Amino acid sequence: MSMSIRVMLVDDHALCRSGLTELLIHRGNMQVVGATGNPDLVVPMLREHQPDLAVFDLRLANTDGLSLLRHVRSQGCETPVVILTMSDSDADLSAALRAGARGYLLKDMEPEEMIDAIGRAARGEMVVASAMTLKLAQLLQSGPKVSVRGDLVAQLTDREREVLNHVAHGQSNKVIAKALDISHNTVKLHVHHIMDKLKLRSRVEAAVFAFEFRSETGGNKTGSDGVIK
């Protein structure tokens, strides 16, 4: 069995720390190796515990999560950091990604989506709450041109396009498997092929790709069910 993901939490609300700790341990089968609301303790704790991922609240009593992230990096700590917040502001999202956060999650996400996103971030993916995907797409300006996207989409099978459509809506492999009545492993294989064919590195990039492809083609490349054609 693979080692459990090790997570550290930084939030100055004790109730939030406690609730997320319970969620990750008992429903996510992860280890919470440290939790604090004191920014001064973050660097020492990161060095001591060496977590796979740290989750920082965006708003802290004496600082903010992005300033703390920049401070952590200046001290030589390279632990990946995901920002967790109630803010759905595109400005905050942009600032977090520019600061080097691996992800941007919302506190009102469904528990299973939260667990899935934190797990994927710990394994190296960039993650963004599904509710923020369209805002992320609007922030990205350097993706491939529509003619290139069209050529890439043409490589996908019909089933891969269906799976991409579900990914674009922020759905997990488990949800996609149920919706398409296929196995979880089959979904994972389809996602792997999609990433390879579209030259993408994460599910967030896949969601943004699908949104931009629809936008640039005026929806002409989608069916009545919204699936990319």
Image (tube, rainbow, N blue to C red):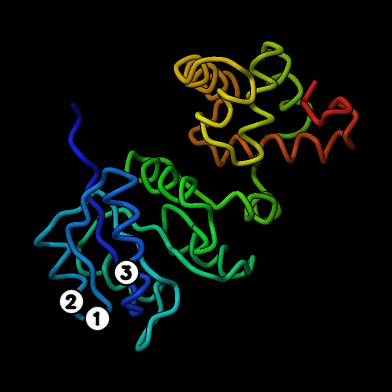
Q: Nearer the viewer, residue 102 or 12?
A: 12
Residue drawn at (90%, 29%) of the image: 220
When the figure is inspected, residue 146 is found, relative to residue 114, above or below; the finding is above
Query: Can you give x and y, in whole percent of width and height, for residue 96 in the image?
Result: 48, 64
Q: What residue type is labelled 2?
A: Leu
State the residue position of label 2: 41
Instruction: Look at label 3 and name its amino acid.
Output: Arg
Relative image position of residue 133 (x, y in whole percent): 64, 50
The residue indicated by pointer 1 is: 38
Cβ–Cβ under 8 Å for marks 3 and 2 = no
Of helix, strand and loop, which one carries label 2? Answer: helix
Residue receiving disc 3: 17
Which mark, by number, is residue 153?
none
Q: In this view, does 119 lie to the left or right of 35?
A: right
> Amino acid type of disc 1?
Asn
Q: Quadrant of the N terminus?
A: top left
Residue shown at the point (18%, 76%) measured from the top left: 41
Residue occupying the point 42% across, 58% down: 101
* Local crowd size for mark 3, using a 10 Å CA cut-off: few (<14), some (14–19), many (≥20): some
Which residue is found at the position 32% from the left and 52% from the top? 24
